[in-house]
Image: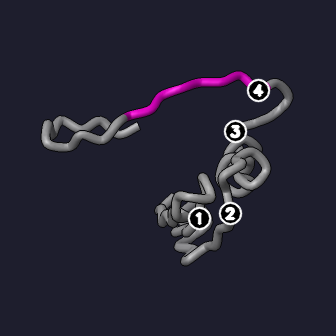
Amino acid sequence: MINCDNEEINLPVWKCSIDIPNTNVKQVCQRILHERYLWDNHFAESRTVEKIDDDKEIVQYVLNFLDLVPVRSFCEFR
């Protein structure tokens, strides 16, 4: 988690914890980062834009919430 003392940045910070028996951190990260299509009903597609190294990549993904709402495209560094 990043702590920031700058009052001008109003980004929400989410914090949670969960206990998943018979698994490890690497398996959980794999499921969240690379298998989103299995648990997110709004997920449409994704692609890796650039793999920087083994732990860093830039990913673009598309979410489709409703038929009347345009699809939303996101690009994130993770």
Q: Which residue in the structure is indicated by mark 1?
A: 62
Q: Say whether disc 3 or disc 1 marks the residue closer to the N-terminus.
A: 3
In which quarter of the view is residue 63 placed? bottom right
Range drawn in magenta = 13-20
Residue lying furthest bottom: 50
Residue 3 image label: none
Tell me the residue that label 2 is attached to: 44
Which color mode does the image show? one colour
Q: Which residue is mark 3?
A: 25
Whether 22 is among the magenta residues is: no
- In percent of width and height, residue 26 lies at 71, 45
Q: Residue at the location (30% across, 41% down)?
A: 11
Distance of label 4 from label 3 (alpha carbons): 10 Å
On the image, the x and y values in percent for residue 30 come to 72, 51
Residue 59 shown left or right of residue 14 in the figure: right
Describe the element under mark 2 as helix, strand or loop. strand
Residue 16: in magenta span: yes
Decide which of 53, 44 is in the foreground and name it. Answer: 44
Q: Amino acid at mark 2?
A: Ala
Which picture quadrant has residue 3?
top left
**Which residue sits at x=65%, y=68%?**
46
Judge depth for marks 4 and 2 and give the one in front: 2
Expressed as whole percent of the image width and height from the top left, the position of residue 17 reads 59, 24
- Of badges 3 and 1, nearer the viewer stands 1
For badge 3, the amino acid type reads: Val
4 and 1 marks in contact (CB < 8 Å): no
Q: Secondary structure at mark 3?
A: helix
Can you identify the residue that label 4 sits on? 20
